[in-house]
Amino acid sequence: MAFPPYTGLGGKITHYSFLIFCAFVFLFLIAPILVIIPLSFNAEPYFTFTEGMMALDKEAYSVRWYKDIATNPQWIFSAKNSIFVATFSTLIATVLGTLAALGLSQSHMPYRPLVMGVLISPMIVPLIISAAGMFFFYSKIGLSQTMPGLILAHAVLGTPFVVITVTATLAGFDHSLTKAAQSLGAGTSRTFFKIQMPLILPGVVSGALFAFITSFDEVVVVFFLAGFEQRTIPRQMWAGIREQISPTILAVATILVCVSILLLTTVELLRRRNERLRGVSSS
Amino acid sequence: MFVLPLLAFVSVSFVLPIFDMLFRSVDNPVVSTYLPKTIEQLTLWKGKELPKEEVFETLARELLIAKKNRTIGKVAARLNFETSGMRSAINKTVRKIKKYKGNRYKQALIKFDKRWGETNTWETIKRIGDRYTGVQYLAALDLKMGPEGKIIPQPEDRQIYVKIFLRTLWISLVVTLTCLLLAFPVSYLLATLPLRISNILMVMVLLPFWTSLLVRTTSWIVLLQRNGVVNDIIVWLGIIDDGSRIQMVYNQTGTLVAMTQILLPFMILPLYSVMKTISPSYMKAARSLGASPLRAFVRVYVPQTVPGIGAGCLLVFILSIGYYITPALVGGQSGQLISNFIAYHMKSSLNWGLAAALGTILLFAVLSLYWLYNKIVGIDNMKLG
């Protein structure tokens, strides 16, 4: 960054200390995530860099903790559960959330603030309260400690994200397009699939990814609502951290970081595509 | 109506459970269900001296019935929440009544356990015999019903929740202010840099945002523990010697550091989006009119960021007061927040009424803050990522 010619020494010092401060904050944000990646390749069962690792000795690194995950039936079991629950809850959340967002975008929607408040509430209420409420209620109707119960709970938690992202996409939607399609003779469903759907798809996919990661990461509701048969990866990690933290946890964490990088990239690309389509300069 | 399916779905599987919990905080079925006649007879009792012989007899019979139906455990547990020691008193009494052949129950019960000879015990039974009660809320605020229906504080050693509520508010406040302090310069930098560079730096904000909470909490344990990376660095730098490594996790410090890092993106994102809209020409105008850089910044730039500051602070504060996972894993004893006590009463002590009452108080705190957030920012304007 070039300084204007009138900048004095004081101005430069302020500016550089500002930059250093920012660098520290970025380090604070990202270091905890990055540090576990090399540590997960530690050959020793420690959580710190051994001398061998510092000297980049090949012997000091190993993939033993990754092998441990791949051969441990508990991790495989919980991974399957996680993917199963996240997939189905995302499906429910996306379909219902997209429909609701379409309804909300219509101008003659009555009680809009109230309806929006109810739809967003799963995101607002602290998780511990949602989990407690669901535990009482789902136990009463026999859904606790079952797969459908957990899927429904996660679907509810994911819907606000879908509603918000799709509503945001629809805010820039040109409604004359649907009118044009209808005046040319297309039915409601044809208009939806041929005109609206392709345009709001980026919003739907981002919303779905949010819903997916919400379910995939969620541990509090699982903690209350799921039995041993519904153990998910986060629940398994929780138990690992609570009981005895082993480097296997770090290997799992590293894999999860890779998953989040993948998701983040997808969402970012979709956001840029959406902005390009709508002709908004990316901001 | 496209909204209806989701509205119905959220109502049934989310809003209804929440109301169920609200109801549970005043619902008090145990004693009135399992000791109905005793409660009925106690309504006539004035509370000056011990109840009459017949009340003792009814209680003895109903305790035996409860024993037979295996509901005695629930009754004992409920009474024990009110006065510790009642569980053993009831179990002892039931064992002895079984063998008792006489018909002078008053004398016998007092002999079995001296608590039956105290009016306090009977007042407790009478009080929690109400089908609906606000007792759990009193307990949640470290209060209880004393003799003659007066509200008195809990004994010193049982006064915990007010302290925990205050601690939760305090930690949330510290986390919020720290986040603001760290986020403001960073958002300013992101908003003023050319887009090409700020997009790359933005990844450093968004990646933590997308990374699993458990992963981030785990890494803070790894970093901060006694043999962790941070201590290693401090020792290596020679600031402290190997023997005096600092315990930074499993206490309040751990909770504070980890929560700040986890919630920081929620502060940066709204601040950034507001700062992005502030035109640099205002600052230039102020400078050209003779304001010093500091004066221009404080008087011209900062006031324009207030909506972002408000949104970010409220969001971070709301998220912090309901925080559960991180304090539970890195908080140790001193870093536990109100959510952790709700979980404790749900999972371990099984005092669900109290858990529901604590949850209701927390819920109303959060909802009123959201109402404020909606007034200032508008829920519709909430942005994700």
Image (cartoon, rainbow, N blue to C red):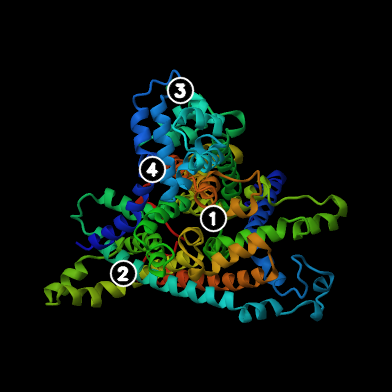
Judge depth for marks 3 and 2 and give the one in front: 3
Depth check: give the residue in front, B125 or B13.
B125
Residue matched to label 2: A95
Which amino acid is tagged 4?
Tyr
Residue type at mark 2?
Val
Q: Secondary structure at mark 2?
A: helix
Compute the Cα span from label 4 to label 1.
52 Å
Marks 3 and 4: CB-CB under 8 Å? no
Which amino acid, by three-letter code, is at mark 1?
Pro
- Few, some or many C-alpha atoms within 10 Å of disc 2 (few <14, some 14-19, many ≥20)? some
First in sequence: mark 3 vs mark 1: 3
Of all chains, the one bearing label 2 is A
Can you identify the residue that label 4 sits on?
B34
Of the numbered discs 3 and 4, the one sitting upstream in the chain is 4
Tell me the element at label 1.
helix
- Quadrant containing the C terminus of chain A is bottom left
Q: Residue furthest front?
A: B101
Tag 3 secondary structure: loop
Query: Reading the chain from its start, which is encountered first: label 4 or label 1?
Result: 4
Disc 1: which residue:
B265
Give the CA distance from mark 3 to mark 1.
Answer: 62 Å
Nearer mark to the viewer, of 3 and 4: 3
Image coordinates of residue A99 in percent, x first then y, are: 27, 66
Figure disc tally = 4
Q: Residues within 10 Å of mark 1 (few under 14, many from 20)?
A: many
Residue occupying the far top of the picture:
B48
Q: Which residue is mark 3?
A: B50
Mark 4–mark 2 Cα distance, whole angstroms, equals 47 Å
Residue A64 image-quadrant placement = bottom right
Q: Are marks 4 and 1 on the same chain?
A: yes
3 vs 1, front mark:
3
